[in-house]
Amino acid sequence: MSSLKWFGGDSKAALQQMMDRNCAFLMYIGNGNDDLTKIFDDTNIIQLLNNELILCYKMDPLSPSFKNFKDIFNNVVIPSIYLLEKNNTQQYIINKKQVLTNSHDIHLDLKRQLLNAICCIIKDISDTINVDDNKQKYLQYLTDVSKKLPLFDSPNINAGVQNVAEEIKKSNGIAKIKFKVPYKDITIVKEFQTTSTLNDIATYILCQVNLSRRGIKFIAHRQFTGEDFNQTLEALNLCPSSTIYVHLDMEQSNQWLYSILNYQSWLGNVLNFIIINPFNFIQHFLISLVRPSPSVEAPRTINHQNKNKKQTVKKTTYKASNIHQLNTNNSDDDENNTYNGNSTQQL
């Protein structure tokens, strides 16, 4: 029987490995003699955890590393299992639920908690990866984990988990909401009262990331509508914890942009008609009064008359000469034709 491969270095080296490999960091905190360690004896669990996408590390509660860990994460329970992302913005905690008394159901529930946490954290990591080739191995791993989940199903567990969720909501009144804004690559985790409305937490995240509500859609287990924003987190089944994706609705954003451009175009036309056109008219009118138009027609008329006079004189002289020659009695018709022809050539 194979065994689980635990990381052999210290916590600092383990964290560096997590950063380099961009994998989920599974941290078991305990002395090794509890119900949590028994889930690592299951062959199906071992097969899933001995994978490059999971780094398993044991932390002794008496070690200096645990002291530093406790300073970062409040209310650390011993024993427990933590699953962390590379940026440590979200942790998934697995521990024994007191509502379950049967040891078999306890072990099944712990295994289901572990696999569900792995699914959530691998999904979160894959959402940050843009290269399809690298993303494919995370998606394939999610498929493998999902196939194992039915092996640890039990009616008693489902009922017990539901009771625990109800108890948490009633006793704490706190909902832990993780906001992911993919197109800005931002992740924020915040706790709210379960009586807070979706509108309250929407106002919070939009202020944090400096966004306008117009053209924004919120998605968790479904896309929320306008009516949902008046509902409480408890009524929307967002308790005790949920992940909300904040996406930019490009269609609405473009429609808003077009409406702005159309409004600006319409406003420009109105201003042009009411202010600019009358101003230009008055300006041209005043300029015409101050600057009299130059006299251009008179010289043209004089030149035209002189030109006509010259042409008239010249034409009259020419015709007089022709008439004189044609009326001469000493010339016959042939001579006149010859003269007229030579005169035409000379001209």
Image (tube, rainbow, N blue to C red):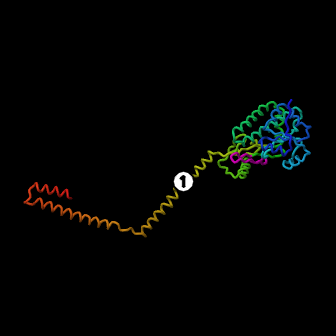
Q: Quadrant of residue 308?
A: bottom left
Q: Whole-percent x and y of residue 220?
A: 72, 42
Q: In the figure, is residue 4 to the left or right of 292?
A: right
Q: Is residue 345 visible?
A: yes
Q: In the figure, is residue 244 to the left or right of 278?
A: right
**What amino acid is found at the position of numbered circle 1 in the picture?**
Ser
Residue identifier under label 1: 265
Q: In the figure, is residue 276 to the left or right of 102?
A: left
Please report the residue visible at 86 percent of the width from the left and 44 percent of the height from the top: 10
Q: Whole-percent x and y of residue 60?
A: 90, 43
Disc 1 residue crowd, few under 14, some 14–19, many 20+, Cα 10 Å: few
Please tell me whether residue 191 belongs to the stretch shown in magenta: yes
Dot 1: what SS?
helix
Q: Is residue 240 visible?
A: no
Which one is in front, 291 or 29?
Answer: 29
Instruction: State the quadrant of the C terminus.
Output: bottom left
* Image vertical order of residue 49 relative to residue 180, above or below: above
Q: Whole-percent x and y of residue 166?
A: 82, 40
Magenta residues (range): 179-197
Q: Quadrant of residue 115?
A: top right
* Image vertical order of residue 258 relative to residue 319, above or below: above
Q: Quadrant of residue 106?
A: top right
Q: Whole-percent x and y of residue 329?
A: 7, 60
Please report the residue visible at 89 percent of the width from the left and 33 percent of the height from the top: 103
Number of marks in picture: 1
Please report the residue visible at 87 percent of the width from the left and 36 percent of the height from the top: 100
